[in-house]
Amino acid sequence: MAGPPWLMGDVEGRFTLTLYADLECPFCREYFPLLKRWFGSNADVALQWHHQPLATHEPAASAEARLVECVAEAGGHAAFWQAVEWVYAHTRSDGQGLPDGLRYPESTPAVEQCMASGRADAVIRAQATGATKSGVTATPSLRLLDRQTGQAILLQGPIEGDALLSAMDMLSASEAAATPITEMPADAVGDMPR
């Protein structure tokens, strides 16, 4: 049975790129299609979602996170990513949530039962707590892990594709140097607005 973390791409690939995001974050909403496009043209990478609903976007952020978790519980990895895209396409963003009365078109009794149960809330809380403990302070943020070396780097803010490739190269090169890399500020690797 599939379960979180929800992945897309080459799960056996050398790199795992974890996206820390809030479904109400306007920057995440703009960045997600760009990241997905970059991701689709780069092999050897798995994309993993990590919920980080921001307090300023509540309760809408957690309600939408609950929806995508429940859709995924019922339908698996592909259903999760489809639900994320749907939420980003329909949310009013910045804590305003989905328009009143709008329902997810692929909703099923299993999704409705999950939504009523609160099971997804534990996953969302655990991911948000884990993100905070690992130093994630803004959304979107990315954690790039080289599964071959165990080296990882935290990239704050929306990071451009070329900068992601540079970070991958840096992690690969650090295998020989064996120096731990833990964080790179966004202004050192990209110039997208934050």
Image (cartoon, rainbow, N blue to C red):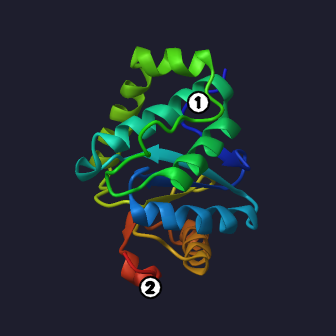
**What label does residue 134 carry, if any?**
none
Residue lying farthest left? Answer: 56
Q: Earlier in the sequence, mark 1 or mark 2?
A: 1
Total numbered labels placed on residues in the image: 2
Image quarter in which the C terminus is found: bottom left
Instruction: Determine the image quadrant of residue 39.
Output: bottom right
Q: Which residue is mark 2?
A: 191
The residue drawn where x is 66% and y is 32% is: 106
Q: Is residue 109 left or right of residue 179?
A: right
Depth check, mark 1 against mark 2: the one in front is: 1
Q: Residues within 10 Å of mark 1 (few under 14, many from 20)?
A: many
Q: Is residue 117 visible?
A: yes
Instruction: Determine the CA span between mark 1 and mark 2.
Output: 35 Å
Q: Is residue 149 left or right of residue 10?
A: left
Residue lying farthest front? Answer: 101
Pick whichever, 17 or 177, lies toward us.
17
Reply above or below: 8 against 92. above
Reply above or below: 12 against 41. above
Q: Which residue is mark 1?
A: 71
What SS does tag 2 mark? loop
Percent coordinates x, y for residue 64 in the rendering: 44, 39
- Name which residue type carries label 1: Val
The residue drawn where x is 46% and y is 36% is: 101
The residue drawn where x is 51% and y is 14% is: 113
Percent coordinates x, y for residue 83 in the rendering: 59, 41
Pick whichever, 92 or 122, lies toward us.
92
Q: Is residue 153 visible?
A: no
Percent coordinates x, y for residue 151 in the rendering: 50, 59
- Name which residue type carries label 2: Asp
The residue drawn where x is 43% and y is 45% is: 98
